[in-house]
Image (cartoon, rainbow, N blue to C red):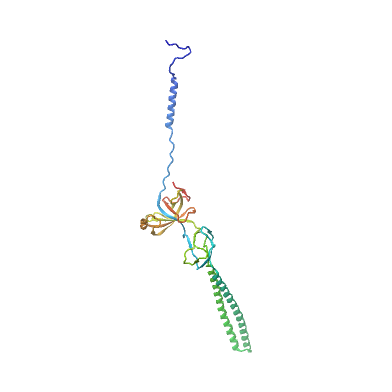
Amino acid sequence: MKSHHPCSLPDRPTLYPASLRLGAIAFGLCLLLSACSRSPDPVPATPAPVAYAAVARGLVDIEGGLLALSMPREGTLTEVAVHAGDHVKKGQLLAQLDTRPAALAVDAAQARLAQAKAQLTLLGVKQAAAEQRAHRLVAAVAAGAGDGQSADDAREAAAQLGAERQSAQATLEMARQKLDEAHYELQQRSLRAPFDADVVQVSAQPGATVSPTSGALFTLLPGKPRIVRAELNESFVGVIKPNMHAEVSANNDANGTRWSAHVLRISKVYGPSTLENDPQIRANARTVECVLAFDQPQNLRIGQRVTVRFEASGAGPGRAVPKD
């Protein structure tokens, strides 16, 4: 018979009150019901894709394109005043030829002008004296104290001097024109920037002999707004209209930036594609040039290839937006 210590309790499982078990079950049911009744989190709406009326290849350019300048006269370059990458102002010197022959021509024209002025002055004095003598002889003949033939000869001499003076006046005007011509030729020995521009290329150096047929010595990028010349496939010609909104993106741009633009004009002449990479497609494709202007000024490189997406919805905001 096994003995028990007076203070020990008998070995039996611990029993929980029924009310405690029922409360736990009720609490669990409440949590389950609250979880089921809670509304799901809202799913962000996916923006609707933009509808494009057409997509075309294009190039960044400016109105009129780059400007190629050559020397207007033949001669030896004595100075090349700018370098590639410089910014020039209107009227700034680009290059200059040897000016000594033209300067000598100016000096000679000035001397001929001075001579013509002196001759005209001399004839004026002679004419005044002849007219005065003729007037006196006529008065003497009228008073019966003079010879009529002498009066006639004096009048004829005054008239002849008047004709010579008119000829001298014409010679003077011709001398002025010759001087202006000499100054113009002197100016043609210097090549100056016709407007504000950036110098893209310089193909000249002092000591070189050049002429108008030698080719361009300077290539300038005028400070004009950038445009896009897009090649519009003939199937889209009737879809694209002036003022239609478009997005321009640079080819192979890692940032995926797009620039807002709008259509300026559409050519009325078909031509071959020049931007198509496949030579077989390029030979058969017929395109129309479509010129676009950026809604905000851009400083993109001339000749950069771009893709133009014409939006069917019309005009849009004039700002660059990231591509998705």
Left or right: residue 302 versus residue 157 is: left
**Which residue is situated farthest in the front direction here?**
207
**Which residue is situated farthest in the top direction here?**
1
Q: Nearer the viewer, residue 138 or 224?
A: 224
Left or right: residue 93 versus residue 61 is: right
Residue at screen point 61% across, 81% down: 126
On the image, which quarter does residue 103 sit in? bottom right
Q: Nearer the viewer, residue 217 or 32?
A: 217
Q: Position of residue 29 (x, y in %)?
A: 42, 27
Residue at screen point 60% across, 79% down: 122
Q: Position of residue 245 (x, y in %)?
A: 44, 52
Q: Is residue 16 above or below residue 224?
A: above
Q: Is residue 264 above or below residue 12?
A: below
Q: Position of residue 1 (x, y in %)?
A: 42, 10
Q: Position of residue 268 (x, y in %)?
A: 40, 59
Residue 126 visible from this viewpoint: yes
Residue at screen point 56% across, 80% down: 164
